[in-house]
Image (cartoon, grey):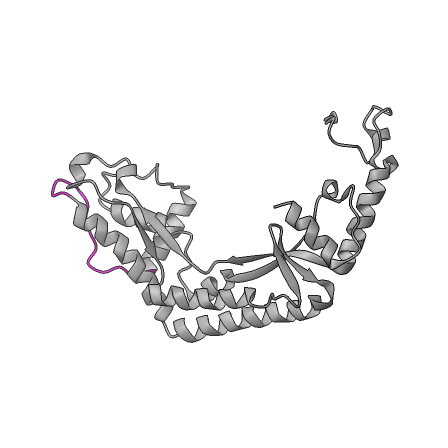
Amino acid sequence: MSPKYNPNQLSIFPELSGDISTPSIATIPEFDIALGNLIKMSDLGAFIQINIQGIDKSYSLNLNELHITSDFLQKDTTPVTVHLFSQEIRNELKKLTYEVKSFFNRGNSFNTSFGYFLFRSHFPRWKTYLKECQQTINDYISTTFSGGVYGHYFIDHFQKGYDLIKKTADVRAPWVFREKILLKDIQDLRHELLEGGSTLSTLTPTDLEYPFQLIVLKTMHIPMVLHQYQAQVQLHSVFKTIHLDYLVGIEINTIEDVRKLTKKLK
């Protein structure tokens, strides 16, 4: 393996690059300044990026994009997005996620293009608060969707896509539509399609069960049971750093210095 040379990037270990004339970053005065500023900035606080994952589950359905013979469909259909939960439920979940950001205020942070710059003195409280928010969301999910409620939501959003195909299907289509859809049937077909490496493009539109197969693949990423959905709902707090290039030619000593720097970088 040969090293790649980038004239805009200094080498940390020039003696390993095969070109000892390549300047080392450790010998550049600007590096010492930038690193010193980075250390002082870390003493003041850190940029935090918040990631909220797994809450809103949905799938899109556009029959016009699929390789379905036009004779099998009555007319062109409008693409739709089918959500797992009702709008009311989604709004409640959004409110809970907004509570995460309510932690940040003028007394403990300021907002930047890099994320919130949280003052170091508030790190312990932020860690605790994030856990509290995660627990609140978990409690809401458990209370709202336990007792089989989640399964009903899953079947309902699966049925919406299935019924759309049924409504649009022409009498010439060879498809057979099921009177009742069961979670076990979906689970069994999931395993079968996964084991066979099936994709949307490998499905056969002339297959009698094509509509069912299609929606099973479309909903493959959505958990069928509550505990699996709940496990995917996660709040993550990522501490971000800043490139050393931004810390050359300035001096960081106070929070105000950091604030001025981030305003220049917008």
- Residue shown at the point (22%, 38%) measured from the top left: 206
Corner quadrant of residue 157: bottom left
Q: Nearest the camera: 14 or 31?
A: 31
Depicted 25 relative to depicted 41: above or below = above
- All told, the count of numbered labels is 0
Q: Is residue 139 rendered to the left or right of residue 47?
A: left
Secondary structure of the magenta portion, mostly?
Answer: loop
The residue depicted at 36 percent of the width and 48 percent of the height is: 217
182 inside magenta stretch: yes
- Left or right: residue 118 compared with residue 135: right
In the rendered image, the vertical position of residue 122 relative to residue 236, given as above or below? below
Task: Magenta stretch: give its range.
Answer: 170-183
Q: Where is residue 165 in the image (x, y as percent from the top left)?
A: 22, 48
Query: In this view of the protein, which residue sits in the foreground, 32 or 10?
Result: 32
User: Any magenta on residue 28?
Assistant: no
Tell me residue 174's x, y (percent): 17, 42
Quadrant of the drawing holding the N terminus: top right
Residue 204: tell me if it is visible: no
**Residue at horizontal 35 percent and vertical 63 percent from the top:** 85
Asked if 177 appears above or below 75 in the picture, the reply is below
Is 165 left, or right, of 45 in this rendering?
left
Q: Nearer the viewer, residue 170 or 109?
A: 109
Let me know if residue 149 appears in the view.
yes
Residue 74 % position (x, y): 15, 41
- The location of residue 43, given as percent across then percent down, is 78, 59
101 to the left or right of 162: right
